[in-house]
Image (cartoon, rainbow, N blue to C red):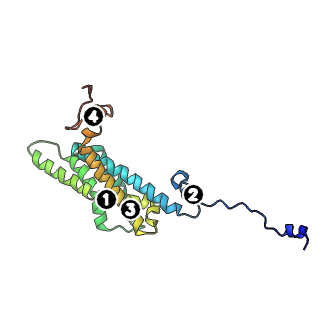
Amino acid sequence: MSQTSGEDHKPRWIPPAVKYHPKVDDDLLTGFRHPSGRPGELRGFFATTIAISLVVWDLSFSLGAYHTVFYYRLLQIFVVCAVLLLGALVLRRHVTVRPWMLAIFAIPVVWLTWRLIVPIGGHWRDVYRAIDVLLIGLVLLTLPVTLWVVARILAPEYFELSTLRLRLASAGIILVVAVAGLLTGQFNDHVVNCHDFVVAGDDTPANCLNAPTGGK
C-alpha cells in the first residue's frame, strides 16, 4: 500500500458534539428549554409553587404580625369563591360539582352577606363577633381546597408531574414558606421596624420596634 493511500485511510479528527452538562447549562436561566428534560412539568412545578407560596406567605405573615387576616385578602378569597360558585351553577349541565364543594365556595359568600345585612355592634356585639370569627375561621380552614381548585384550573402542568415526590416537594416548600411567614410576622421586630410598616401604608404591629434614630 502506498504512502498516499495510507494517508487517505487515516481517521479524520471530528470535533466532539456539544452535549448538555448540568454544570454548564442552567435550567432556571434557560427556562427548562433543553429538549431532553421535562420542561412542561418542571415549569408547572415552579410556577404553581411560587404562586401559592406568595399567597400563603402574605396570609401567614399577617397572622403572625397582626393576628388577623386583612379584609382585602378575605374579599379576594370571596371573589374567587364567588366566581367558582356562580360558574358551577351556571354551567351545571356541563360540569359535575359535588354539593360539599359548592358549600365550601359558599362560605365566603355567606360571610360577606352576614356583614352586609347584620350591623356591627349594637346589643349583640359579642354574638356578632363570635359568628364573624367562626365564618372567617371556616374560610381559612377551607382555603387549601379553594387553592387546590384554582391550581387545577390555572396550572394543570403541576398535576402532570410524573412522580409523587415532585408533588410532595411542592407541598413541603409551600408549608415551609407558610411557617417562615408566620414566624417572620410574629418576630417582625427582628426583620423590619415600625417605619417600614408606615412607609408601606400599613398599621404598625404591637411588637414592632422604632428605627435606631427614634423616628417613625
Residue 85 seen in render: no
**Tags 4 and 1 touching, CB below 8 Å:** no
The residue that mark 2 highlights is: 33
Relative to 207, say whether 139 is above or below.
Answer: below
**Of the two numbered discs 1 and 3 in the rendering, the one whose residue sits closer to the viewer:** 3
Determine the residue positioned at 32% across, 31% down.
199
Which of the two marks, 1 or 2, is nearer to us in this view? 2
Q: Is the C terminus in the top left, top right, bottom left or bottom right quadrant?
A: top left
Give the residue at mark 3: 169
Q: Residue at x 48, y 62 (%)?
A: 41
Give the CA separation, mark 4 to mark 2.
42 Å
Identified by mark 2, the residue type is Arg
- In the rendered view of the protein, which quadrant contains the N terminus? bottom right
* Residue at image point 40% right, 69% down: 164
Verify CB contact (< 8 Å) between mark 2 and mark 3. Answer: no
Q: Give the residue number, with chain letter if any, for mark 4.
A: 193
User: What residue is at 32 percent from the left and 57 percent from the top?
Assistant: 175
Q: Is residue 15 left or right of residue 186?
A: right
Q: Position of residue 158 (x, y in %)?
A: 44, 62
> Nearer the N terminus, badge 1 or badge 2?
2
Asked if labels 3 and 4 touch by Cβ distance under 8 angstroms, the answer is: no
- The label number, if any, that marks residue 194 in the structure image: none
Which residue carries the number 1 mark?
A: 144
Labels 4 and 1: the sequence-earlier one: 1
**Where residue 90 sits: x, y (%)?**
39, 61
Mark 4, other Cα within 10 Å: few <14 / some 14–19 / many ≥20 = some
